[in-house]
Image: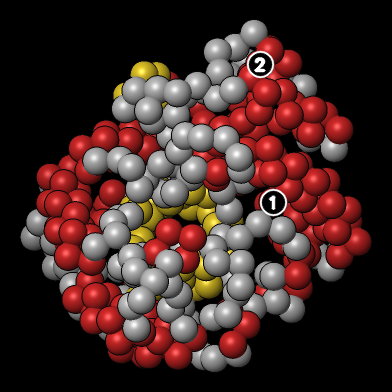
Amino acid sequence: MDSLPPAPTSRRDWQQRLFPEGLPRLWCPLLTPFAAPRVVDPARLDAHLRFLAPSVRGFLLPGSTGEGWEMTDSEAGRLLDHALDLAPMLGFRVLIGVLKTDAAEARRSIDRWIRRLRRRTGCRENLGALVRARVAGFTVCPPKGGGLAQADLVAALDPILASGLPIALYQLPQVTENELTPATVQSLAGRFPNFILFKDTSGGDRVALSGRDFGGVFLVRGAEGSYPKWPRAAGGPYDGFLLSTANAFGRPYARLLDLLDRGRGEEARRLTARLEAVVDGIFAAAAPLSGANVFTRANKALDHWMAHGPAGTAAPAPLLRSGQALPESLLATARDLLRAHRLFPRSGYLS
């Protein structure tokens, strides 16, 4: 029997084992397509992943955009199985979103995921099962509570990080009502080499802008807008993006990163202006509506046209997890914005 490679002892070791081809700079919190209430549409999911995978090499699922806060573990498991079936062929990596407002429930959920991945891969060793399944780790948020002190957040996260499994921390004060401070993130990074990635969707960017040394934790920005100023290639503080709108704009965002790498800042700014106009417009239109969350509503509206192209006028409106269909008014706004800013596809990826 082949001997197992030694367990990682440093963050670099963890990242190299989980991402032998390097960490993706562009990540997407994948939408969940539904054929009926709480029923994932596997054919639609496959088509969406095939559309994105040439540009997006890392996916968070289920994330907030994929209605992960509302999903049961059983629903999320079916979604993950569909995605992981395609991962080896399309070459992407997955972070499993363990979106729970209670840290103890998050720990129990991670234990269930590990058992599921061991069964799926036939590998009895945790890290081996993750690598074989192309799962890069588990994404968790601090527990929910606006009155929680930093010590409370650390006490909740410590047992998760002490599990010895690869963990990504997700700053999402829109849901948790609190934020990890730069000092707290630095302390966790110093104590836990299996803390591999930090996503910040707060829009305040206090951790990345603090100037602290996080020991190689990969920093990704989840907030929308002002894209060229944030990547390290342009002198910014982030290693990459994890953007909900990558569901529609994976290819343009990959091009934007390439333009910045090549020093073509003016082209990057022109592309950004078009993207921002669509993103700002669709989020403003989706904000007052009900059902799921604004990330889901806005991105499902954009993805409808990416999937169907001009035929989207006659195609059924996409469903939320509840079975509620997106309103025609939001789909019309998405269509008009995409056309106005030259981002409307000639044909959809379902064609």
| Screen quadrant of the N terminus | bottom left
Farthest residue to the right: give it: 266
16 left or right, relative to 325: left
> What percent of the width, then of the height, locates residue 202?
55, 67
Residue at (49%, 60%) from the top-left corner? 174
Q: Amino acid at mark 2?
A: Gly
Of residue 88 and residue 38, the one placed in the foreground of this image is 38
Of residue 69 and residue 144, the one placed in the foreground of this image is 144
Disc number placed over residue 253 in the picture, else none = 1
Residue at (85%, 37%) from the top-left corner? 341
Residue at (36%, 45%) from the top-left corner? 68
Disc number placed over residue 312 in the picture, else none = 2
**Residue 203 visible here:** yes
33 left or right, relative to 350: left
> What percent of the width, then of the height, locates residue 86?
39, 36
> What percent of the width, then of the height, locates residue 156?
24, 75
Q: CA distance from mark 1 to mark 2?
A: 23 Å
**Residue 344 visible here:** no
| Figure check: 267 above or below 74 | below
